Every structure is written in C-alpha cells, then in structure tokens.
Image (cartoon, helix red, strand yellow):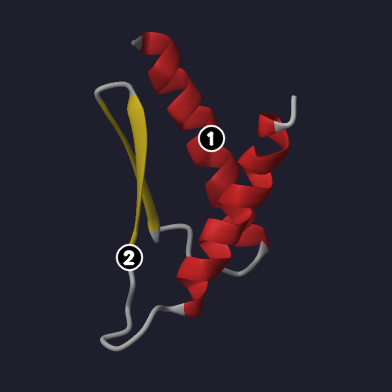
Amino acid sequence: MEKNIGDVDFFKQVVKRLCKKNNISPQKPKFEIIENVMVISIKNHLKDGVDLDCFNILNLIYRTIGPLEES
C-alpha cells in the first residue's frame, strides 16, 4: 500500500503544480485512495452548470495520464 500512497502523492503534486501554472486554485482537486483506486474529487462552485475550472482540471488530468495509456 505504501507504493500506492507514494504514487498518489506524486500524481497529486503534478496536478497541483499544473493547476498553479494554469491559474487554477490548487485547492479544488482532492485525492484519496479507496480500495487501491485513486479517487479525485473536484469542487464545483456553480449552482447551475459546471464551473469552467472543473473542466480545465479534468483536461489537465487527461493530458497527464493520456500519454501513459499509449505505452
């Protein structure tokens, strides 16, 4: 389990740094491990619709892990 926690910490730091670089609050995404699955929660601040930052964070995550799937 320690390896998974280290992986989460590394991935968490990458996403938070990308958020800062793209002027997105790094507090929005929250990371946790539940039964060896990484769960990422993103806070939406709009009552109607989805906050644009949520889409930007999901795009950053996709661009980070997308290339890994091709390996």
Q: Position of residue 26 (x, y in %)?
A: 48, 58
Report the Cα–Cα distance between label 2 and label 1. 18 Å
- Pointer 2 with pointer 1, Cβ within 8 A: no
Q: Earlier in the sequence, mark 2 or mark 1?
A: 1
Q: Is residue 32 left or right of residue 56?
A: left
The residue carrying pointer 2 sits among few (fewer than 14), some (14 to 19) or many (20 or more) residues within 10 Å by Cα, namely few
Q: Residues within 10 Å of mark 1 (few under 14, many from 20)?
A: some
Specify the quadrant of the image occupied by residue 66: top right
Give the secondary structure at mark 1.
helix
The image shows residue 54 at horizontal and vertical percentages of 46, 68
Q: Check disc 1 and give the amino acid type.
A: Phe
Residue identifier under label 1: 11
Quick check: 9 above or below 48? above
> Which quadrant, please, contains the N terminus?
top left
Rendered image quadrant of residue 69: top right
| Relative vertical location of residue 49 with respect to residue 18 in this rendering, above or below | below
Residue 24 or residue 49, whichever sits in front: 49
Quick check: 51 above or below 58? below
Please state which amino acid type lies under the numbered disc 2: Lys
Check disc 2 and report its element: helix, strand or loop. Answer: loop
Q: Can you tell which quarter of the image residue 71 is in?
A: top right
Q: Is residue 22 left or right of residue 8?
A: right
> What residue does disc 2 label?
43
Residue ID at (61%, 55%)? 60
- Position of 49 with respect to 16 (left or right) is left
Query: Residue 50, image x and y in percent?
Result: 39, 78
14 and 48: which is toward the camera: 48
Per the rendering, the mark at residue 25 is none
Residue at 59% in and 41% down: 14
